Image (spheres, rainbow, N blue to C red):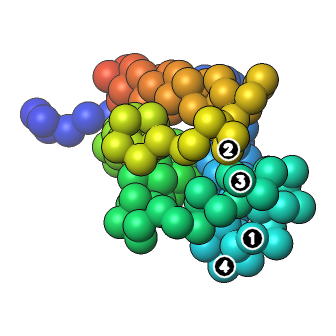
Amino acid sequence: MAGIIRRQPAPWHLWLIGIVALLWNGFGAFDFSMTLTRGADYLRDAGLNEAMVQYIHTLPGWLYAPWGIGVWGGVLGAICLLLRERWAVWAFALSLAGAVGSNIVSTLVYPPPAVAAPQGAMAILPYAIMAIAAALWVYAWRMARKSVLV
């Protein structure tokens, strides 16, 4: 039959990357949910200073959209990857777009005041998140091209 794509066997690393991606993005979704539901208490427990807590609470509601798209797109992408569905490529693309959008918003549109700005490892975290999101998207795209995801 012409036009039917045969699913290729999954390499061992698909399961490893899928599980790690689900844990990584699951934590992002947990952090997003807890920030929205527990607010200041969660943020203080996470070690943020009072200035950063206040900054987060003054953000307009629409600014949470890129973050939400990023984390929930990542969760969906990881699930699709583990189910070997081609939709993982699109979900990880949404995750990457959300991560980039969130970083643009937090650096250019609504930057935190200097006293609230992340320091040390926290300052590079947004770039690490974008790099991981990009790597997951590329990985899913390659698996789809090899017909591991159909």
Q: Nearer the viewer, mark 4 or mark 1?
A: 1
Amino acid under disc 2: Ala
Which residue position is annotated with label 2? 116
User: What type is the residue that disc 1 sits on?
Assistant: Ala
Query: Where in the figure is residue 107, as x and y percent of width and height?
Result: 45, 35
At horizontal 82% and vertical 72% (from top left) the residue drawn is: 41
Q: CA distance from mark 3 to mark 4?
A: 19 Å
Counting residues from the start of the chain, the first of labels 3 and 4 encountered is 4
Query: Which disc is residue 37 wearing?
Result: 4
- Element type where label 4 sits in the image: helix
Task: Answer above or below: position of 140 versus 150.
Answer: above
- For badge 4, the amino acid type reads Thr
Residue holding disc 1: 40
The answer to whether mark 2 and mark 3 are in CB contact below 8 A is yes
Looking at the rendering, in which quadrant would you find the C terminus? Answer: top left
Q: Are marks 1 and 3 in contact (CB under 8 Å)?
A: no
Q: Please, what secondary structure does the residue beneath circle 1 have?
A: helix
Tell me: residue 39, above or below residue 50: below
- Position of the N terminus by quadrant: top left
User: 141 above or below 88?
Assistant: above
- Upstream in sequence: badge 2 or badge 3: 3
Residue projecting furthest to the bottom? 37
Q: Residue 149 occupies which quadrant of the picture?
A: top left
Amino acid tagged 3: Ala
